[in-house]
Amino acid sequence: MAGNALKMLVVVAGVVVVAGGHTLHLGRKCPEIMPFPNLSVNKVLGNWFVLHKFDTANTCLKWNLTRVSGDTLLVTETRQLSFLDSLGVDHTHAITARLDIPNPEVPGKMRIRWPTSLTGSADFIVFDTDYETYMAVFECDRAGLLHRRSATILSRTRNIDKMFVERVRRLLDTAGISHSALSTISHDLCRESGNHNWHVDGDLFGLLPGVDPAEVRRRVSEGVQEYDVTQLEIIGEGISPEDGTFRGSLKKRPEV
């Protein structure tokens, strides 16, 4: 596969990753979930296998958390993109995000900035862990009249006891957060390195010539806020009555 075409496929796959791994909901208010009390940040550093995550088909997800300063961490997520796997591309893909701890007295409540995010920083809340076996994280970001949610269950090994998964589900239930989109991540056919290895640690749209990332974010995260909600029309299925998930899309009604 030609180099430029392959690079474009990586960009496309990266955009798909932005849309995946989350559920979309109407309203800017994120649900509240209690951060793990008195989280010892140093004890959650290191390697984790991502075994369950909202709505994703990618495989071999792993996180590596490192500390760069007192209140700043980095999380590097490696994965195999299902889109490229389906094309038979021998690859690995990594992305590094910055984690900030705004309030050192509540270290479990952080803010994360993924390079592929169009909506800026998101809440990143470690809400359960025993440090040595598993960890659970809830993420939420806002864009206009919508917000996106994601929950992640991680393990220090490739397997996790079912009781920990059930515990996390109960905590999500208590917070009123539906976990029906929680997918199982396969680690069966993982490679440490492929013929093609990509690492994104800057804005995704910096890979695309002629695209102004500031303008993209303005349109996505700010433009819709200028609309009168009475002038917005929901296209498609709208809000799911089962879990409150937003399954439609929005457009501004034409002026009459």
Image (cartoon, helix red, strand yellow):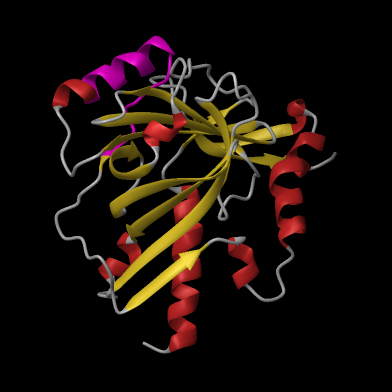
Quarter of image, res 212: bottom right
Quarter of the image where the N terminus is located: bottom left
Query: How far across and how far down the image is residue 58, in percent?
Result: 31, 54
Nearer to the camera, 133 or 122: 133
Image height of 46 relative to 214, above or below: above
Regarding residue 94, the answer to whether it shows in the image is yes
Nearer to the camera, 2 or 195: 195
Which residue is rendered at x = 58% and y = 28% of the image? 26
Query: How far across and how far down the image is residue 186, in percent?
Result: 20, 49
Which residue is rendered at x = 60% and y = 32% of the image? 101
Quarter of the image where the C terminus is located: top right
Query: How far across and how far down the image is residue 7, in percent?
Result: 48, 78
Is residue 166 a member of the stretch shown in magenta?
Answer: yes
Image height of 33 relative to 157, above or below: above
Residue closest to the far top: 174
Quarter of image, res 102: top right
Is residue 218 a member of the stretch shown in magenta?
Answer: no
Which residue is rendered at x = 30% and y = 14% of the image? 170
- For the magenta stretch, what is the residue range? 165-183
